[in-house]
Structure formats: C-alpha cells, structure tokens
Image (cartoon, rainbow, N blue to C red):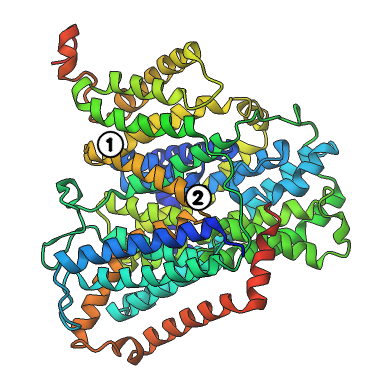
Amino acid sequence: MDLIHNLEIGLGTALQPANLLYCFIGTLLGTLIGVLPGLGPTATIAMLLPITYNLEPVSSLIMLAGIYYGAQYGGSTTAILVNLPGESSSAVTTIDGYQMARQGRAGPALTTAAIGSFFAGTVATFLIAAAAPPLTAVALKFGSPEYFSLMVLALITSVALAHGSILKALAMIVLGLLLGLVGTDIYTGTPRMTLGFLELADGINFVAVAVGVFGIAEILRNLENEREREVGVKTVTGMMPTRDDFKAMSGPIVRGTLLGSALGILPGGGSVLASFAAYTVEKKISKTPERFGKGAIEGVAGPESANNAAAQTSFIPMLTLGIPANPVMALMIGAFIIQGIVPGPNVAVERPQLFWGIIASMWVGNLMLVVLNLPLVGLWVRLLRVPYYVMFPAIMAFSAIGVYSINSNIFDMYSVALFGLVGYLFFKLGCEPAPLLLGFVLGPMLEEHLRRAMIISRGDPMIFLNRPISLGLLIMAAIALVVVFLPTVAKKREQVFVEED
Amino acid sequence: MTINRKDATAGALFIVLGIGFGLNAWLTLDLGTNLRMGPGYFPMLLSGALILLGVVVLFHALSIEDEEWGHIPWRGLFFILLGPVVFGLTLEGLGLVAALAILSFITSFASIRVGPVLAIALTIGLTTFCVAVFSWGLGAPIRLFGPWMQVVGLGN
C-alpha cells in the first residue's frame, strides 16, 4: 500500500513538534484573517512570505498552507454571525447562514460549517495523496512543448472559471505575462522593458505586485464605504445540531465535497467558484427550494464543504506540475523558490518528506481547526468588534516590513504603492486582479518553454500540434475558450455568480 | 447611443499599454527568428495580443449599458499610497523604528474616523508590536536606528 506508506512518511514529518507548532500558527492566523472581512489569504500569505525565509522549508510551507484552508473555516463564522463574508468564498454562506443565526440557530449553523469543512478537508487530503503520484509520473515525461501547452490551458481555463468579463480577463492575463517578462532576458542577458531602472534588472518583485493588487487595493475598496460592523448575534448557545439537521446536512456535505474537489483542481477554480456552484446545485436538487434564503441548513453545509475541499485540491497542480491554479498557489510557488526548491514533479521524487509532510499536515490542520473554531467561537465574535480603522495601518506596516525583507530593496516600496494604485484602478474598471497575477508568474516560464520548444523543432511551430499530449492540451484549451463564448453558457456563467450581489 | 465608460476606459488602457510595451520591444530589443527567438520576440507577440484585446473590449463597450463609477475615497487613496513611499524614503536613513512610526501615523489618517489622538495611540501600539514581533521575535535583518538618528544619540 503505497498510499498508506506515503502518508506515514508525511505524518512522521507533520507530527514533529516544530511542524505541529507552525501548522497551529498557520491555521490560527488563517482563522483570524478569515474571520476579519477585508483581509484575505492572498494578501496575508504575500505579507508573510518573506518572513518564512528563516524557517525550515517544510515548516514554512505547512504554515502558509494552513493560512489558506484555515481562512475557509474562519470565513464562515463571520458569514453566519454578521452577514458579511469574512472571505469571498463564504459569500453564499451569508444567505442561509445568517438567517439561521437570526432564528437562534447560529450554533448549529457554525457546527454544520465545521463538520462539512472537516469532512471535505479529510476527503481532499486523501484525494491529493492518491492523485499526486500518477500525475507526477506523467509530468516527469513532459517536455517543453507539453509544458507550454499545459500553461496555455491553465491560463485559458482560469479565465473561463473566473467571474466577470472574459475579454477583460484575457487582457489582464496578457498584461500579467508582459509584466512578468520585465527584467533580464535569460538567454542573452539583455535588460528588457526596464525603462532604464537598474532595480528592475531582476524583474518586478512578485510579492510587491501581490501585496499591491490584493492587499492595498482591498484596503482602498474598504475605504469606499466605511461602516461599522454590526455583530448581529452576541452570544452563541447550543452548538449541537438536531438529529434532523444531521440528516439534512449529510447529502449536501458529500456533494459539496465532490464538487469542490473537482473544481479546485481546475485552474482558476478554487474555493470561491466551488462555494457558489455548490449552493446552486443544492438549491436546484432540493425538493423544497423555497426554503433557501430563509435558513436552509443545506445552504450552509454544501458551500462550506465545497470551499474547503477546493482550497485543498488546488494544491494538486501546484505540487505535481509546478503550475498554480490560483493566486494563492502562485504565492506558494514563490515560497518554494525562496527556499531554493523548484516546484514541479521532482519535488515528490527528491524530497518525499517535504512533499508528503505538507499533505499530511493538511489533515492535522483540519483537526486543529475544528477545535479552534467550535469551542473558541466566542473569542472570534469578540474579535469582530475590532474596528476597521485599526486594521488599515496594521496591514500597511506588516506589508512594508514583509516586502522590504525579501531583497532589502527600497525600490520595492515604490512598487507596492504603484501596484496598489494600479490594482485599485483595475478594480474600478471592472478587471479582476487574479488573472494578472497568474500571468505574471507564468510569463517567464511560458516564454522559456516556447523558446526551447522552437529550438527543438528547428523553428517549426507545428511541434505543438505534432506531439499528442501537447495537441490534446491545446484542443482542451480551444474547447474551453469556445464554450465560454457560447451565448447559453455565458448566461449560465453569470447565473452561478449572481447570488453574490 | 450608450457607451460603457468602465469598459471603454479599460479597452483604451489596454491599447495604450500594448503600444507602450510593443514600441519598447521593437525599438530596443532584438526580435530574432522563429528558430532562435530574441529577447523581443515574445514581448512583441504579447503586445500585439494586448492591443487586439483592447480594441475588442473598446468596441464591446459601445454595445452595453453604462455603469456608475461609485465613490472614490480620495483621502484614503492619498494616505494609504503615501505611506509606503515615505517608508521607502526614510527607512535606510532613520531605521525601522522611526520609519515604521511615520508609516503607521500617515496611514492611520486614511480612515475618516481617525483623529490625531487616535493616530498617535495607533502609531505607538503598532510600532512597539511590529518591532517586538519582527525584529526581536523573527529576527528580520533591518536596522532599528539608522545613521540619521545619530543626531539624537541613537544608532551608529
């Protein structure tokens, strides 16, 4: 049993005292930022990335992973008690979760979210463990043409599954790719598009871009309408769901987990899409759809399971192929690189302790999260009384120290301010920042594989169509692109996200 | 005729950026050939794609309803963006403690709810916390007091 053996290696690493501690810190931080609206896992991981430089590679990656799935747990608490999504992936949970809270059933709603998340987290952990070895084996056979086509597919699907205008998202990807190319050309050593700035010789600082477009732009969005948060439910009593509740939640939890796991693997999918899709599915198959919006427990169980499952399975393409499915995974790739590890299929082969340690830590972390979230819910409720205006300078201070510590380069501070402005401008223009960041990370890789492929083929672009795996990947990309532009699908696509408004 | 100002602006911006990147690549970089792509080849390709997408977005804007811009938080925009710039200008001269205090103080004013007293309290609290956590706790290699602080007898 390879699976069991691998998980044993992983647990051996994950259960070391130091790693347990960092797993706990990660999940605690994740819950914290999940509970607080206005600070997401992308910005948090970007800020903390530089600080992980001093940690052991395993410890730092375990902690950063914990922040991401921890945020999925924390987000539901705010959604249920305050009717605000603590995390964008909990946006649909507000619909029925808050109604349950108003009916005095906040406790069962929170418990349902935690049980669903834990079940989903457990299943997703095993899924990663089962899917990783075969995918790694395939990926090891990939050459440059295959990698190029795979990245094209990843970029196209990330647009198809994101919400908002497809055209603008495509343009944001291309812009991201261009920004990613700024710096020194690796083949000739020529400085490219640096506008004469010597500081840009190593390229634009990735963390500065991430902090700018996700962290600072988010603060500016919050400043648009400052309002007090009202904690609708002051005390939570009676956490235990009734027997009927258990019966009602089991189906949605299983369906949400499966749906979330599938959507998490796809580029651009991730936890937000998963929760929206799960809610839509539950409402559609329910015998009593009119109960939705009025405190239906299925409307909490489905999305909350789906978002946690997706948060975890989105690690699969990152761990096995070295390709990020969403901005958080792009940052995780950055974390690998800071530690001097090139993410990709070789990680599982050369560093099994690290690879399986991260996977096993997810299950350990999920266990910690149930404890953190259920008995300690009162603590989180109190945290919600922290006014927003305290958070703005705090986020700015953490970001500044974090970004500066990467390269000790003053220039990066100006990049942060610039990309904060750019991120906010694009938000105002209705353009999503996620495709930009994905393009930014993939830009240099995409170009390198393109150039290598052309050298292999002696300048014949047909190489991408002559190699079967590459051709298959490109056909899938073409289908994805055609499908999202079909009028009926475009309409459906809007409907999935419509509940958000 | 309706025109969606958001999309029209976005489209125009993409076109301008595409032309900018494209000109830069064309004028300063070697394009190379299909076989041996130069440093300018891929940027040139992408610039063309960006201009094309910009044109499509711009034309599409002519056929959809206009949207409101919404409120723009000028005060917040000013103080939040000023923070990191001033931090960058002062960090190496003043050291972490003072630069952090200035950053916290400036960005505190981003919120309309914060006055001078609250800003000072936030500054003291945040600076102490950050120095304790990042400098003493995590050992971030940033000098606490820079050369400019010698005037007041701190640093070296």
Vertical placement of residue A401 versus A41, above or below:
above
A211 vs B69, left or right, is left
Query: What chain letter is assigned to the residue under label 2?
Result: A
A86 vs A249, left or right, is left
Q: Residue A195 at x, y = what percent?
A: 19, 53
Local crowd size for mark 1, using a 10 Å CA cut-off: few (<14), some (14–19), many (≥20): many
The disc, 1 or 2, on the residue closer to the chain's N-terminal end is 1
B121 vs A407, left or right, is right
Which residue is situated farthest in the bottom direction here?
A: A466
For the residue pair A458 and A191, the one nearer the viewer reads as A191
- Give the residue type at disc 1: Tyr
- Give the residue type at disc 2: Phe
For the residue pair A58 and A49, the one nearer the viewer reads as A49
**Nearer the observer, disc 1 or disc 2?**
2
Residue in the image at 66% along x and 60% along y? A497
**Residue linked to disc 2:** A427
**Residue linked to disc 1:** A404
Residue in the image at 34% along x and 80% along y? A146
Residue in the image at 47% along x and 27% along y? B110
